[in-house]
Amino acid sequence: MKSWVLCALVLLAMLASGCTAGPAAPSAPATGAQLLAPTVAQTAISAPALTAAPRPPTPTLTPASIAPVAPTRISWRALTEAAPGAPLRHLISLAVAPDGALWVGSDNDGVFRYDGVSWRQYTDADGLADNSINSIAIGPDGAVWVATWFGASRLEGERWRTYPFERDFVGNDYHPLAIGPEGQVWVGGGRGLLRLEGETWTPALADAELAALPALALLADPDGALWAAVGLRGLYRAQDHAAEPVGPAPLPQGLRVRALLAAPDRTLWMATSHGLYRYAQGAWETPAEGLPEGYVTSLALAPDGALWLGTHGQGLMRYDGQRTQRYTVADGLPASEVYAVAVDREGVVWAATASGLAYGESR
């Protein structure tokens, strides 16, 4: 009897062990619909989605504060039309609005808005002063301004309100825009620097000799002052119609300034026909080796703190404070002449060229 009970107990123990130690049930196989469902990477898109999410803090842009990172190769995509019959060509200006929309200015086809889903084209039929959009600036209230050969225009609803220039102001130079922290509007031209007072443009500089020179690049300060690159005289800081020279001096023969950019640490970058200049703590210096010595057309800061440079003939460059990476037609850009560069809040880099718009991830 004891032997029979013992055998029964052993048999029950073996059965219990088999139930608890057996393998887990396999997961159900994927259905045909699940296998065919496209992933984000597989879905064809014409351009990346844009977002108005809050921008992360930008690190200061100095060699000491930027840790070197391994070089990365960005895959660029080119866009040659906003819609059938609306080509993206001869692009010369870019800006990203607070709502995340991308604004693209062309030389003859007006300005385009891309909201992440669709494109909208505006021309002189919508009230623009002209269809050649030299520059684009976004005001502190989110208002979009553009400068053309014959006036500056402000978007109001779906129409543009235009403030025309006097013909003797236009000249043959680029027309940069700057919007101050209280909505002040400045525009540079071939014969001076103007400020909008009500609905009238007035000279922004009291010095008659200085006021007659081209103003080729502008940057509004948070305190209401204006940085202006004037003719071949270098950089000035203007406030209350007075201008103080900032340098650099002496300038190389024939140097022309194309863009100004201020980093969060108040370092000022100046893009010129002779390369990139940096102004920090009251002194000018040439940045680290490897930055272009040729024509730099435009500047933009990415959320990761990297500085992006558009160049004339050398494509796009990314500078992390120590290292420079270059991207050209071989990497997917539609042209090596980049006239404007912008970076949205998601780190997507946009480049405007004569042959179309390019974009790539800055990650």
Image: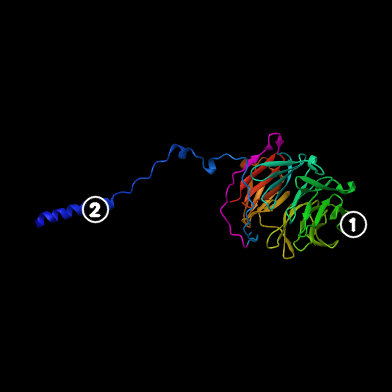
The image shows residue 257 at horizontal and vertical percentages of 77, 52
The image shows residue 227 at horizontal and vertical percentages of 78, 59
Count of marks, rendered view? 2
Task: Indicate which disc, 1 or 2, sits on the residue closer to the N terminus.
Answer: 2
In this rendered view, identify the residue nearer to me: 354 or 273.
Answer: 354
* Residue 25 seen: yes
Residue in the picture at 38% in, 45% down? 27
Q: Could you tell me the amino acid type at mark 2? A: Ala
**In the image: residue 31, left or right of residue 129:** left
Q: Which residues are magenta?
A: 64-87
Q: Could you tell me the amino acid type at mark 1? A: Glu
Q: Residues within 10 Å of mark 2 (few under 14, many from 20)?
A: few
The image shows residue 58 at horizontal and vertical percentages of 64, 59
Q: Residue at label 2?
A: 16
Q: Secondary structure at mark 1?
A: helix
Residue in the picture at 68% in, 47% down? 102
Main SS of the magenta part reads: loop
In this rendered view, identify the residue nearer to me: 13 or 109.
Answer: 13
Q: Residue at label 1?
A: 209
Which quadrant of the rendered structure holds the N terminus?
Answer: bottom left
Question: Extreme left residue here?
Answer: 1
* Residue 313 seen: no
Residue in the picture at 87% in, 57% down? 210
Q: Which mark is residue 97?
A: none
Question: Extreme bottom residue here?
Answer: 281
* 84 in magenta: yes
Q: Where is 200 relative to 32, above or below?
A: below
